[in-house]
């Protein structure tokens, strides 16, 4: 179900933040970190199940937040590479340490959320009332890239 309120957007942000930290930043070493994704790589089969499950949750949240096709494609590329390398025993752990796919996909979605001007109304209502132009102006003034009406 797509988001309908600002509160729903905050829940999506919080869910994505949790997946990001759990998957790739449970333990940090300066700019590097390791999470369940990297640790479970050492258990054959389990790492892939976790990787795919966490990726699925990120995509559910992206769908709920009405992420653009470009963001979804970027997330897909990060997560596909992460999943493909997970099953390669020693290589997978090393790749996960230096290429945190879930973290990168989560940041892409969070950036999309940050650069979107959210309106708790429908576009039809906004156009009828003349508020659409005001929302477009506010979006441009705030240097946002997208305008999303939550009631649509």
Image (tube, grey):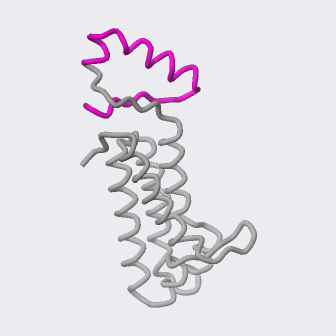
Q: Where 63 sits versus 139, above or below?
A: below
Locate residue 150, reporting x and y percent: 32, 34
Between residue 13 and residue 44, name the one nearer to us.
Answer: 13
| Residue 79 within the segment the image draws in magenta | no
Q: Where 126 sits versus 148, above or below?
A: above
Locate residue 91, reporting x and y percent: 58, 81
Which of the 4 image quadrants contains residue 39?
A: bottom right
Between residue 27 and residue 40, name the one nearer to us.
Answer: 27
Which residue is at 50% across, 82% downward? 88
In the image as oriented, which residue stretches furthest toward the bottom?
Answer: 43
Locate residue 132, reporting x and y percent: 37, 15
Q: Where 71 sits versus 37, above or below?
A: above
Which of the 4 image quadrants contains residue 45?
A: bottom left
Which residue is at 32% across, 56% downward? 60
| Residue 149 within the segment the image draws in magenta | yes
Q: Where 38 sits versus 18, above or below?
A: below
Locate residue 41, reporting x and y percent: 50, 83
Give the number of callouts. Answer: 0
Task: Please state if 64 lies on the left or on the right of 41 as rendered.
Answer: left
Which residue is at 25% across, 18% downward? 124
Which residue is at 30% across, 13% downward? 127
Q: Magenta part of the protein: which range?
A: 125-152
In the image as oriented, which residue stretches furthest toward the right?
Answer: 30
Which quadrant of the rendered structure holds the C terminus? top left
């Amino acid at each position: 179900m797509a988001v309908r309120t600002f509160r729903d957007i905050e829940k999506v942000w919080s869910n994505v933040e949790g997946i990001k930290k759990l998957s790739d930043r449970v333990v940090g070493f300066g700019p590097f970190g390791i999470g369940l994704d990297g640790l479970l790589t050492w258990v054959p089969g389990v790492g892939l199940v976790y990787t795919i499950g966490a990726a699925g949750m990120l995509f559910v949240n992206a769908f709920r937040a009405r992420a653009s096709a470009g963001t979804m494609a970027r997330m897909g590329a990060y997560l596909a590479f992460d999943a493909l390398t997970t099953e390669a025993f020693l290589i997978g752990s090393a790749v996960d340490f230096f290429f945190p796919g879930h973290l990168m996909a989560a940041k892409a979605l969070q950036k999309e959320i940050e650069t979107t001007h959210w309106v708790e109304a429908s576009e039809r209502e906004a156009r009828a009332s003349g508020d659409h132009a005001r929302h477009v102006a506010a979006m441009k003034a705030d240097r946002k890239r997208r305008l999303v009406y939550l009631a649509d």
